[in-house]
Amino acid sequence: MTLKGKTAVVTGSNSGIGLGVARELARAGADVVLNSFTDRDEDHALAAEIGREFGVTARYIKADMSSAEECRALVTQAGQCDILVNNAGIQHVAPVDEFPIDKWNAIIAINLSSAFHTSAAALPMMRKAGWGRIVNIASAHGLTASPYKSAYIAAKHGVVGLSKTIALETAEEPITCNAICPGYVLTPLVEAQIPDQMKVHNMDRDTVIREVMLTRQPSKQFATVEQLGGTTVFLCSEAAAQITGTTISVDGGWTAL
Ligand code: NAD
């Protein structure tokens, strides 16, 4: 499988799943554009390292996914966008009646609206190139719910709905749009949730991991960023050309329960 000649833009890719996905796309031969809202030397160094390791062109472009203009500018600045992976995401845990309004707005903007804006900017490029893949990193929480995560779950269900709509709008074109729904993957986002969950459930770290976080993941194992990258590469393959408007769960059996 080679993605040589394709350019992939991965939002929120200076850590965690986005970085893992960018690395697997580069391993498959794609040129990659990494992104986050920071503009540090280490962000650019990360891209340079991927470029060297896989022999592809790898760039880092700063853009804040909470801004409609910056979402669209990211794709424009990339110059080419054959593969768009909407991955940027944040989390906040609180009951609905205590959920801070600014957190709700930020989660909806970064986790949901950014995928609308980047897709709107990328689709004309994909049409011009005669090929395109949009892969949205949703969540098992795009298909099911849990308490205290109202904004995240609303956003992720929204991403699944947006993916279906884009798939229908592009159904007769060589463009697909799907959502990957990971269960728990041990990344900085999940690491940051552990103290909140410990507080909400009044449990120690190990107990919260086993009994709260992985309680709905029957495999009792975190998924890996490499597995998510591999699933993304599969969705970009010829074998997946007729897979569109659907979700692929990488959740150790969570949604089978
Ligand atoms: P992470 O915190 O490691 O990565 C999030 C990425 O988004 C980082 O690169 C961060 O810099 C970036 N980001 C945050 N705010 C941004 C902004 N305003 N503009 C641009 N970039 C921004 O978290 P992760 O676990 O790798 O999560 C990545 C995606 O996977 C998220 O959408 C998350 O909801 C989803 N997801 C994660 C898990 C999990 O268990 N880790 C499970 C299901 C879904």
Image (tube, rainbow, N blue to C red):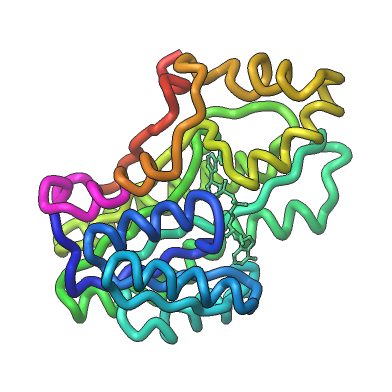
Quarter of the rendering occupied by the N terminus = bottom left
In the displayed structure, would residue 120 be above or below residue 184?
below
Could you tell me which residue is drawn at 67 percent across and 54 percent down?
107
Q: Nearer the viewer, residue 205 or 92?
A: 205
Instruction: Please provide the residue range marked out in magenta.
Output: 232-243
Q: Nearer the viewer, residue 228 or 226?
A: 226
For the question of whether residue 123 can be seen, the reply is no
234 inside magenta stretch: yes
In the displayed structure, would residue 58 be above or below residue 22?
below
In the displayed structure, would residue 186 be above or below residue 41?
above
For the question of whether residue 228 can be seen, the reply is yes
Residue 35 lies, in percent from the top left, at 52, 70
Could you tell me which residue is drawn at 55 percent across and 18 percent down?
216
Could you tell me which residue is drawn at 76 percent across and 38 percent down?
93
Q: Describe residue 132's horizontal placement relative to residue 164 as left or right.
A: left
248 inside magenta stretch: no
Q: How many marks?
A: 0
Residue 48 lies, in percent from the top left, at 43, 75
Could you tell me which residue is drawn at 49 percent across and 23 percent down?
221
**Residue 226 lies in quadrant:** top left
Residue 22 lies, in percent from the top left, at 39, 60
**Residue 40 lies in quadrant:** bottom right
Residue 10 lies, in percent from the top left, at 43, 64
Q: Describe residue 225's horizontal placement relative to residue 144 as left or right.
A: left
